[in-house]
Amino acid sequence: MGEQAFPDVPRRRVGAIDFSVVPLERAVGIVVDLGARSLDKGIAIHFANAYNIALAERNPKYRELLRCGDAVFSDGMPVVWAGRRLHSDVAPEWTRVYGPDVMSGVLNTTGAQGPRHYLLGGSSETLEALRLKIAQAWPDAVVVGAQSPSFGTWSPEELQARDEDIASSGATLVWVGLGTPKQDWEVRRLADSLPVTALAVGAAFDFLSGSKRQAPVWMQRSGLEWTYRLAREPKRLAKRYLWGNPIFVASTIKHRKPVS
């Protein structure tokens, strides 16, 4: 569906990715609206940061996947800063649209009339903690299903069973927390298979469940969140930041022309 899904939302390029430029509040409203109605076709929503841009620069298939996304929101402050500098026409509207913030914002406005939430990803322990947190913090939220999928490659039978479970649950929003880039491929597959809105929300499951601590707000706003996360998980995140950040900068310089 690409740009046609939200024709009134401007898209501007940072690095090799075309971002949907909206303030956080409007992004939350878009998702709430999608989750409150029946869709003819699925919607794939991505949240991209400097690492996603680095991956897109080096992987043409992944780059095309994100460019075909129905919406790609700015998940990190460096992306926001680069976007504002490159595209002054939309700078006032360009804010960070962080996966955990969108998920919590949508849950804040949820109720018995919808949306109907499905949780896909995380360990069984994280998923159980997230369901408990939602029940406590957002008691009106309707969680109709959850699944902690196995690691590795899924068989066609596993994917079919997953789709059938989501379809039978009546879910309208499928929150996907499988890690980058796996979750991006999965939200596109889900959107192509089911009339749901699938959102690749990264570490939202870990942060909202309390399984992992978020960086202080001042570090998030100053663009230093990556240093906090790297210090806490150096082995897992070293490649993401030490390899990804320089490529992000190079990619931003390389693709400085506006979206044609």
Image: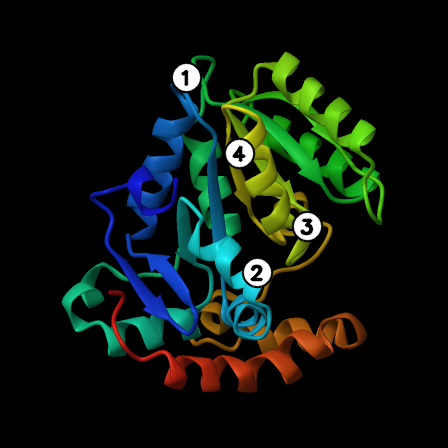
For label 3, the crowd category at 10 Å Cα-Cα, with few meaning under 14, some 14 to 19 and many 20 or more, is: many
Q: What separation in Å lies between label 4 and label 3 (alpha carbons)?
A: 24 Å
Q: Say if 137 sits above or below 8 in the image.
A: above
Q: Nearer the viewer, mark 4 or mark 1?
A: 4
Location of residue 72 in the rendering, given as x and y in whole percent from the top left corner:
42, 53
- Residue type at tag 3: Asp
Instruction: Measure the alpha-carbon separation of dots 4 and 1.
Output: 13 Å
Q: Residue pushed farthest left? A: 89
User: Is 22 located above or below residue 148 in the figure?
Assistant: below
Tell me the residue at 43%/13% (across/down). 113
Residues packed near mark 1 inside 10 Å, few (<14), some (14 to 19) or many (20 plus): few
Residue shown at the point (74%, 25%) measured from the top left: 160
Q: Tell me what residue is drawn at x 62 percent, y 17 percent.
A: 167
Q: Which residue has dot 3 on it?
A: 206
In the depicted view, which residue is nearer to us: 184 or 21?
A: 184
The disc at residue 38 is: 1
Give the mark toward the camera: 3 or 1.
1
At label 1, the amino acid type is Ser
The answer to which quarter of the image holds residue 229 is bottom right
Query: Earlier along the polypeptide chain: callout 2 or callout 4?
Result: 2
- Res. 191 mark: 4
Q: Tell which of 216 and 169 is nearer to you.
A: 169
Identify the disc placed on residue 62. 2
Q: Earlier in the sequence, mark 4 or mark 1?
A: 1
In primary-sequence order, the first of circles 2 and 3 is 2
- In the image, is 3 to the left or to the right of 245? left
Q: Secondary structure at mark 4?
A: helix
Q: Amino acid at mark 4?
A: Ala
Query: Looking at the picture, how far across and down is residue 203, in whole percent?
Result: 63, 54
